[in-house]
Image (cartoon, rainbow, N blue to C red):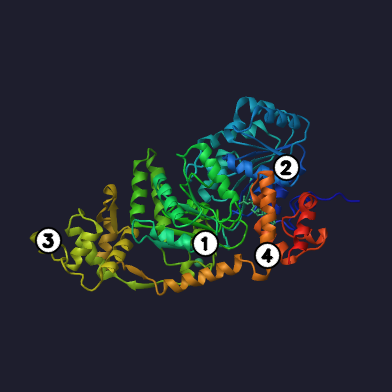
């Protein structure tokens, strides 16, 4: 009888242990490569199933699978999930006590461990390498591999040490995985991690379950954020703000208006952070208001929205942060609020960094690319995918710009007026004063200003339209904003481009949105349809969730470690009466069937 090929055996593990019918996207190709003992680099979108790419070979190949991961929360989640599936997995980090450590080393010595998760510094500690180097190693997986690149936003110097793994484990295949890496970052990963020979698997960056939208900030306050959150009652979400102080204020405000909201940032006491994280994971409809200190490694699958109350740092950061919504494949939203002042701050921060001019240049370009996507006229998802180097990208059909395409109005003449007003006023004033000047409404105007030819020259637009146009000119780099401690001053931007506009060689197009309210309503309608349960199915879905909640509490793990919402939805729809029927639901593998099958069938039978 012919022996099963490695990929057949891998598929068997996928079905039996993980409860999934088929590999997705590049998973099979990556697994096959690693099973053959070769190095690989896999760039798969969030939710694309990167972890299976190393977990399955680690289970099948002889020896220990080592997984390097940057964050304890991420490791804890994955290890708990694997243990539920009956896989021998453990993690070694600073939170693991001596007894537990002893136990892990013992089972490792007996060859009884399939996967061991560690931080880069934990793995690269000399005594650790020594203890591991003479053991059979099935695979070395490097998660979030983009952290090795200084071009990216998540640069972690300790990742640079991982290049040495090539010598320490010369016989083990090494697999680098990440969700975000443009061509340049991929080169960095290859060089730094010594993966010159690795085959590269780069999947599409499409996330069809994400509905993206972005709005210019209307003011400085958090009113709009509150509105957005309240329009999504009972849904779990993350709200990112730019400052620690901002998270606390916004969380308090949301809590006051009845939202189950909590603040999270690196300045909080460790225990408090841990408690809030657990509550976010365990409780329904929790909203985390956080700085970007929160997130990497948060694998909660049913985050239904990510709102940027302040914009992200780059398109990579954007994709990673909004990517935390909808990991279960059900519809989710990414909503970004942004303003020209945010852009000005971003430039200022880059300027203050102590890095080479070359790095600064790259970072400035990244900020520009981010804002031209946010403030753009065309499909956001397509813009992001093109940014990552995808070709022949179709519009997504569901972002705000696809659903309610803005019209372009030629505003070249008004742009010329605004630019000359700024020029004449010498860059010493803010937006409001410039608008007043154009309208000829400046209070207690000095005679010198009233005498300028631009004074009162802009009667054709209303104040809000002028503000909007000035924003547009800022985003296009025709004007430049000086943060000036929160009271921004506006000056002329790139001289060459300004000249082209003066001469009429370059046209300025202003975005005009036809009916934003309608597009918004349409979006919400679709979101509801795809994530809510039919009324007739509600009792069963709720009963299953209640059962899951008890199980989770009993075992002190997050509910989704027991079963994902998606699995519960499938069970609700199928109403299985036998274990065999139940096993067809995605995410129900043998271990979970043995462990929970009878209980789930009981819930189904007992619920009308
Ligand atoms: P990533 O790390 O790439 O964001 P994960 O490895 O956490 O993604 O997987 C995301 C989700 O997709 C998980 O819930 C996982 O169980 C599920 N998943 C992964 N691979 C498959 C597959 N082949 N079939 C069905 N579900 C899958
Ligand atoms: Zn679109």
N-terminal-most mark, 4 or 3: 3
Rounded to the nearest angstrom, the CA distance separating label 3 from label 1 is 49 Å
Q: Which residue is mark 1?
A: 233
Numbered disc 4: secondary structure: helix
Q: Which residue is mark 4?
A: 539
Residue 160 sits in which quadrant? top right
Residue 466 location in percent, x, y?
A: 27, 66
Q: Closer to the camera: disc 4 or disc 2?
A: 4
Front residue of this view, candidates 182 and 10: 10
N-terminal-most mark, 3 or 1: 1
Q: Which residue is mark 2?
A: 58
> Is the C-beta of the residue carrying label 2 under 8 Å from the nearest atom of ligand 1?
no
> Residue 499, can we see it?
yes
Q: Are marks 2 and 1 in contact (CB under 8 Å)?
A: no
**Residue neighbourhood size for the residue with mark 3, other residues' Cα within 10 Å, grouped as few (<14), some (14–19), many (≥20):** few
Residue 122 location in percent, x, y?
A: 60, 32
Q: Which residue is mark 3?
A: 445
N-terminal-most mark, 1 or 4: 1
Tell whether 345 sits left or right of 327: left
N-terminal-most mark, 2 or 1: 2
Residue 352 location in percent, x, y?
A: 34, 41
Q: Is residue 156 above or below residue 579?
A: above
Residue 406 location in percent, x, y?
A: 41, 71
Rounded to the nearest angstrom, the CA distance separating label 1 from label 4 is 19 Å
Q: Closer to the camera: disc 3 or disc 1?
A: 1
Rounded to the nearest angstrom, the CA distance separating label 3 from label 2 is 74 Å
Numbered disc 3: secondary structure: loop
């Amino acid at each position: 009888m012919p022996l099963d090929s490695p990929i057949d055996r891998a598929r068997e593990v996928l079905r039996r242990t993980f409860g999934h019918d088929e590999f997705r996207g590049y998973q099979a190709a990556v697994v096959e490569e690693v099973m053959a003992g070769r190095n690989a680099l896999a760039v798969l979108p969030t939710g694309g199933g990167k972890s299976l790419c190393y977990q399955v070979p680690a289970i099948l190949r002889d020896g220990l699978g080592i997984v390097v991961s940057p964050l304890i929360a991420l490791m804890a989640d994955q290890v708990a999930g694997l243990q539920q599936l009956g896989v021998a997995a453990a993690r070694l980090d600073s939170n693991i006590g001596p007894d537990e450590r002893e136990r892990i080393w013992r089972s490792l010595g007996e060859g009884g461990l399939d996967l061991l998760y560690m931080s880069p510094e934990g793995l690269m500690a000399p005594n650790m390498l020594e203890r591991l180097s003479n053991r059979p190693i099935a695979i070395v997986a490097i998660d979030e591999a983009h952290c090795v690149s200084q071009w990216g936003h998540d640069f972690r110097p300790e990742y640079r040490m991982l290049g040495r793994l090539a010598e320490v484990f010369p016989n083990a295949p090494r697999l680098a995985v990440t969700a975000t890496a443009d061509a340049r970052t991929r080169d960095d990963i290859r060089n730094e991690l010594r993966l010159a020979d690795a085959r590269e698997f780069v999947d599409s960056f499409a996330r069809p379950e994400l509905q993206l939208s972005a709005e210019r900030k209307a003011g400085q306050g958090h009113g709009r954020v509150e509105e957005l959150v309240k329009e999504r009652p009972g849904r779990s979400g993350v709200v990112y703000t730019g400052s620690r102080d901002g998270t606390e204020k916004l969380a308090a405000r949301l809590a006051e208006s009845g939202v189950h909201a909590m603040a999270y940032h690196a300045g909080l006491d460790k225990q408090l952070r841990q408690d809030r994280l657990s509550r976010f994971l365990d409780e329904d409809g929790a909203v985390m208001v956080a700085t970007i200190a929160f997130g990497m490694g948060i694998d909660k699958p049913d985050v239904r929205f990510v709102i940027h109350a302040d914009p992200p740092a780059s398109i990579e950061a954007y994709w990673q942060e909004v990517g935390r919504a909808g990991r279960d494949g059900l519809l989710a939203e990414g909503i970004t609020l942004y303003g020209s002042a945010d852009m000005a701050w971003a430039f200022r921060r880059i300027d203050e960094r102590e890095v080479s001019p070359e790095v600064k240049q790259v970072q400035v370009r990244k900020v520009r690319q981010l804002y031209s996507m946010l403030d753009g006229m065309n499909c956001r998802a397509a813009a992001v995918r093109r940014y990552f180097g995808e070709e022949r990208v179709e519009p997504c059909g569901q972002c705000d710009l696809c659903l309610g395409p803005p019209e372009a109005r030629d505003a070249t003449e008004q742009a010329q007026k605004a630019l000359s007003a700024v020029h004449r006023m010498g860059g010493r004033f803010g937006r409001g004063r410039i608008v007043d000047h154009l309208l000829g409404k400046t209070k207690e105007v000095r005679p010198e200003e009233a005498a300028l030819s631009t004074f009162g020259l802009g009667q054709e637009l209303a104040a809000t339209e002028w503000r909007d146009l000035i924003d547009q000119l800022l985003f296009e780099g025709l004007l430049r904003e000086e943060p000036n401690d929160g009271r921004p001053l506006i000056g002329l931007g790139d001289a060459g481009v300004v000249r082209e506009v003066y001469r009429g060689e370059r046209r300025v197009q202003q975005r005009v949105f036809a009916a934003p309210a309608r597009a918004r309503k349409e979006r919400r309608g679709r979101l509801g349809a795809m994530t809510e349960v039919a009324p007739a199915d509600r009792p069963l879905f709720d009963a299953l969730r209640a059962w899951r909640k008890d199980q989770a509490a009993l075992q002190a793990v997050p509910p989704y470690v027991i079963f994902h919402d998606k699995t519960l939805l499938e069970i609700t729809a199928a109403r299985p009466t036998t274990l065999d029927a139940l096993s067809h639901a995605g995410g129900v593998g043998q271990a979970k069937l043995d462990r929970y099958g009878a209980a789930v069938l009981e819930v189904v039978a007992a619920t009308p």
